Image (cartoon, helix red, strand yellow):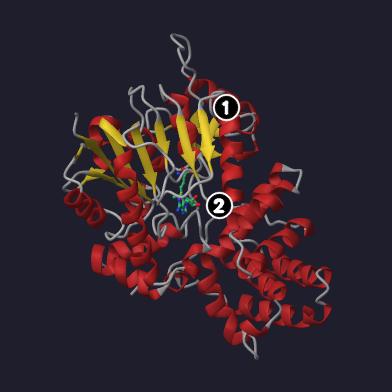
Amino acid sequence: MVGSVNARVPDEGATAPRSPRVRAHALAVLAGIEAGAWSDRLLAARERRLEAPADRARLHALVYATLRWQGAIDARLDPLVRAGLGTLDPRVRAALRVAAAEFLVLGHPAPVAVDAAVHAVRLAGAERAAGLVNAVLRRLAAEGGALDPAATMPAWLTARWSARFGEAAARALVEAANRPARPFAVARAVPGRTGGAAPREDLAREFAAEGVETEPATRHPEGLVVTRGAPQSTAAFAEGRCVLLDEAAALVALLATSSDARPIADLAAAPGGKAALLAQRAQGALVALEPVASRARRLAETLALRAPAGRAIVLRADAEAPPLAAAAFGCVLLDAPCSGTGTLRRRPDKRQRLVPGDIADCAARQARMLDAAAPLVAAGGALVYAVCSLEPEEGEDQLRAFLVRHPEFAPDDPADHLGAAAAGLVSGDPPALATRPDRDGLDGFFAARLSRAAA
Ligand SMILES: C[S@@+](CC[C@H](N)C(=O)[O-])C[C@H]1O[C@@H](n2cnc3c(N)ncnc32)[C@H](O)[C@@H]1O
């Protein structure tokens, strides 16, 4: 169903990572992911162990290119390993995958990648596998040809997208999930600032001084699209003067921003990008929830650095039973845990873990969370529901079912809150922000704003 195209992504990691340290970290990250860790946490920890920003960028590009194309790479490697790719030591498997990604995805010279892979398995103590790695990669390089994009996504998910959006759109969604996403930044809001340069222009200048080039976002009124460089390595990011997230995620935060002076609750707040934007722009206090201790700590760190002092409180709590007072909040944001099918370009390992039953499980949990969120909203306040999923069970079906169960809420038009520039991203009945990576170049989000009747 999904045809074969050249998988080269020349803008992702233009030069071969010759550094053995970068490769050793990449192999450790990939083996850790196979053992059950999440790519973002493991990769961030390994990136911190590299001093040079260029090495961090190389590690990031190498790991992400490998994870995005892993299904297609494995389909080519497996027939070349007599006992099967699955029988190998995880570090050897990772070395093969990384080298294949280098010359089949990133366009690096094959001989350099093969030699580096052989060196890496020796360094990793798998000396006996060096001959196999050399032979398999040389055969793969000699075969040439392109990777099959269809093999990068679970077949059931592509079939689902095809049935819903059509075959061409399903193909485009798979291709979009295999392209790197451009970083996006929103400058820290400066309360009460009038006249002079806008924070966005200040941030653009500060980024430029560190070699990060940007252009103003066309849909988010305060955002910067990064066209070159690594904003996560800048002083502005390290010192809390910006938030990095997808433009669609920033639009969700904008949907929950209002001039209501009553407190705001962010019921699924970690790691905290949207919570930080809300806390910077809110009139009232922000209460941010996350049940898992390590994620609650990360959320607290994010808000300590990026929210105005004293504005945000982190509670380690479950959004299905939030320990919060009824009718106390001017706005409740539920950016619910979901299947994440809209963000597979940023979470490439997720596609290998998704199973069809996840969507129904997520939808059932989201319904319970929505029912728990509804009583928290004060009269005249708003509930913003969001998921980074393309699946209707988590999006429009969920919204319609909630409105039947909760007639005290009525849908707002998101275009009224997001501004004219983002109005083209609003669709459906009831109207919702609905973005797609293939069509809009944004992560796939579904978000709705519902107002509770005034008393
Ligand atoms: C889509 S993410 C939220 C992203 C976040 N709003 C941000 O902008 O950074 C969903 C989050 O919900 C959290 N979560 C999972 N189960 C939860 C629960 N029962 N209550 C609250 N949060 C939960 C997950 O840990 C995850 O961090």
The answer to which quarter of the image holds residue 203 is top right
Left or right? Give the position of 34 relative to 369.
right
Judging by the rendered image, the residue that carries numbered circle 2 is 292
- Mark 2 → mark 1, Cα distance in angstroms: 27 Å
- Residue at image coords 45%, 46%: 268
Camera-side mark, 2 or 1: 2
Judging depth in this view, the residue of 319 and 399 nearest the camera is 319
**Residue 284 in picture, x, y percent from top left:** 41, 24
Left or right? Give the position of 265 relative to 447.
right
Quick one: label 2, few (<14), some, or many (20+) residues within 10 Å? few
- Name the element at disc 1: loop
Residue extending furthest toward the top: 195
Q: Disc 2, ligand 1: is the CB inside 8 Å? A: yes
Locate the N terminus by quadrant.
bottom left
**Residue 242 in picture, x, y percent from top left:** 54, 30
User: On residue 241, which mark appears?
Assistant: 1
Give the vertical position of 255 relative to 201 (above or below): below
**Residue 169 in picture, x, y percent from top left:** 29, 61
Q: Look at label 1 and name its amino acid.
A: Arg
**Residue 101 in picture, x, y percent from top left:** 60, 66
Left or right? Give the position of 115 relative to 205.
right
- Residue at image coords 53%, 63%: 349
* Upstream in sequence: badge 2 or badge 1: 1
